[in-house]
Amino acid sequence: MKKIYIRVDGNEIIATGHVMRCLSIAEQVKKLGAEVVFLTADERPRSLIESRGFSVEVLDTIWDDLDAETDMLIRYIQEHNVEQLLIDSYYVTKEYLQKLAECTKIVYIDDLCSFLYPVHALIHYWVFADEDAYRKPYHNRECDMDFLVGGRYIPLREEFTYQPYQVRDSVKKVLVTTGGTDRLNVAGNLLNRVMQNPELRKLEYHVIVGCFNLNKEKLYRAAEQYSNICIHENVTNMSKWMRECDIAVSASGTTIYELCACGIPTVCLEIADNQKGAGIWEQSGYMLYAGNADMDMEDCMKRCEKALLQYNNSYDLRSEKSVRVQSLVDGCGARRIAQYLADGGLDNAER
């Protein structure tokens, strides 16, 4: 049986986004008949990964200093005859990747375009990416590289495969999802804001709380104070909650693509450096944009309030955005990546 290895981390600082998208890919690899083994720096993401039925090898290294684990990981690759390694971490360095690529085939998920990656394949699923421009800096590379670029490769779970979404006549439920840790307490600030607005406090707010959320207790206290605030922790059926809600407020991570796949009219905002540039969603006409909560929380919350009112007062606006976002994402990206990993070659990935 073919075996695919995945090097990824998750904790209270970087949250679970990297792990979750790798799990989406792993589940599709498993369906193709291959085995998946996760390699992590420490124990923190183990329970999440094992709860999805995959084995975990803990390296006992430092998650934000990957250079320090290079020699150990090379020994592991050699001892276990690792033929292919998918890496998902912002803490890679050129030297780290170069040394690993001399031992096995390296596939890297790139969000940041930090430098020219010395790997065998790159996954860059930014839906607005220009594939030719992304490839161009690599044209002089001595070895061939594969590029899985654009929205066709967004690694979502199978539950986000296309289903028609019916925009309801009026808004009753709002989904709030602000990342796995929400270190800025964006959800709490938003709830405080909307509860002061006579129109918006009539709505139900369904808040998704990640396992590393740093402000969990504050959110539960808000739910005790207001009966229309519902907290959902350890959610395993995210698409269900998305489709039951009429609009969403979301940080601009992978969750944005899940909302697109479901067709939910969305207000997006930025909470981290890797989310900068999210204003393009509004500029391109797909959703409303509320700004950067890290740079100016007050302004961001004002813009969230304004955007929610716009959606609440316009069926036509909700309907337009729903159709547009759902046209971007078909939910099959994880399957395409899995086919590339399990079968090899872009021809298989394009199915």
Image (cartoon, rainbow, N blue to C red):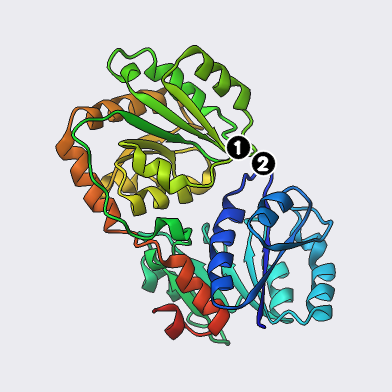
Up the image or down, 287 lies above or below 75; here it is above
Q: Which amino acid does label 1 sit on?
A: Thr
Whether residue 304 is visible here, answered yes or no, is: yes
Which residue lies at the image location 29% right of the left edge and 52% below the top edge?
A: 325
Residue 215 pos. (x, y %): 61, 26
Q: Using the image as rendered, state which of residue 116 and residue 192 is in the foreground.
A: 192
* Tag shown at residue 13: 2
- The residue indicated by pointer 1 is 181
Whether residue 276 is visible here, answered yes or no, is: no
Cα–Cα span, label 2 and label 1 = 7 Å
Which residue lies at the image location 62% right of the left edge and 44% below the top edge?
A: 15
Q: Quadrant of residue 108?
A: bottom right
Which residue lies at the image location 44% right of the left edge and 31% below the top edge?
A: 206
Count neighbours of disc 1 (C-alpha within 10 A) and say few if under 14, some if 14 to 19, many if 20 or more.
Answer: many
Residue 293 pos. (x, y %): 47, 31
Q: Residue furthest left?
A: 316
Q: Quadrant of residue 105?
A: bottom right
Q: What residue type is labelled 2?
A: Ile
Q: Is mark 2 on a helix, strand or loop?
A: loop
Q: In this view, does 169 lie to the left or right of 48?
A: left
Q: Are marks 2 and 1 in contact (CB under 8 Å)?
A: yes
